[in-house]
Amino acid sequence: MMKKVLAAGIMCLVFMSPMFAGGRSEGPAADRTDGPVDIVATTGMIGDIVSNVVGERGSVFVLMDDEIDPHLFRPTRSDIARMQRADIIFYNGLNLEGQMADTLVQLARGRPVYAVTELFDETTLLEDEEDEDYFDPHLWMDVSLWMRAVENVVAAMSEHDPPGADDYRSNADLYLRELAELDEYAREVIASIPSERRYLVTAHDAFQYLGRAYGLEVIGVQGISTESEAGLEDINSLVNFIVQNRITAVFAETTVADRALMAVIEGAAAQGHEVVIGGELFSDAMGPAGSWEGTYIGMIDHNVTTIARTLGGSPPPRGFRGRLSP
């Protein structure tokens, strides 16, 4: 349990710092009359919600682009220099950016550093099935949970920049209405999948929150962290599960190699059962910057629409906002 608590914040050393209270730094409130708040976000999903909250009062730089796996990311010197220039930093927490722990500890001594998953009720979190000392960090897959992360951003920005508090609240309210509509859309399209086909097999175990929220049984070839490797026994077990349940499609991910997934497909073929890759999903990163899928709403729209279409559901041809390719 102690590891879980520490993974939700930066690390034990940060909590010991006099600049921290309740697991986050308390830098001086900024008067933003001199320009927009300079913000760094570790992942695209965080950067997108921060951008929607701050509007014109902030400038958001995302550290990891659409091709980067946050489980394996190690910041370069230029990354660290960029974070050192920031007024405030947002990261996911729950050990998603595990390779950055020491860097975040150092940065927190000079500026506010916030985990968007801070203060989440542990009863809402899923455990890492491979290591019960940690929680699953992929909360953004459940839109209703990610809405709570938006509220955490509002609180952090209002604390850092009190004159902007009303703007942050107003911007967030508009964005949260969109997310509520997205959440309802996800429920509807996943519910359109025949019950006997609601199995989601993916390259790594990043979709458990999505499965819990919207009614899918989720199986990842690799574990929650892409640092783990699927062994032969894991692959054989999954092949048997796929054959027994007559699963005909599995899903690749944009930031995860598909070697283990192809081994599963080949194993099923050896048993006379055909399985295809039913599409590529966004798991630990969004789509390319400037694209619909390069927004958080577009990312989830793509994922749930692709899953529903592949597994026999009836989503709209162009998805939630009519912006997906048919």
Image (tube, rainbow, N blue to C red):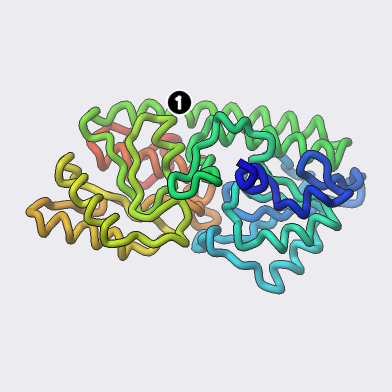
Left or right: 189 with respect to 103?
left
Residue 68 in the image, given as x and y percentages of width and height: 52, 63
Locate residue 151, reporting x and y percent.
68, 32
Image coordinates of residue 30 in percent, x first then y, are: 90, 46
Answer with left or right where residue 177 lies relative to residue 128. Answer: right
Secondary element at image label 1: helix
Q: Is residue 217 above or below residue 131?
A: above
x and y percent of residue 59 in the render? 74, 52
Name the kind of residue labelled 1 in the image. Glu
Residue at horizontal 54 percent and vertical 43 percent from the top: 135
Residue 34 appears in the figure: yes
Q: Nearer the viewer, residue 8 or 289?
A: 8
Residue that extends furthest to the left in the rendered view of this protein: 272
Identify the residue shown where x is 82% and y is 54%.
Answer: 87
Q: Nearer the viewer, residue 81 or 242?
A: 242
Q: Answer whether residue 51 is visible to the viewer in this image.
A: no
Quadrant containing the C terminus in the rendered view: top left
Q: Residue at x 83, y 46 (%)?
A: 20
| Residue at screen point 61% across, 44% down | 4
The quadrant in which residue 301 appears is: top left
Q: Locate residue 158: give its quadrant.
A: top right
Left or right of 158: which side holds 250?
left
Give the residue pinned by disc 1.
Answer: 184
Q: Quadrant of the N terminus?
A: top right
Picture layout, residue 145 above or below residue 277: above
Q: Classify 10 Å Cα crowding around label 1: few (below 14), some (14-19), many (20 and above).
A: few
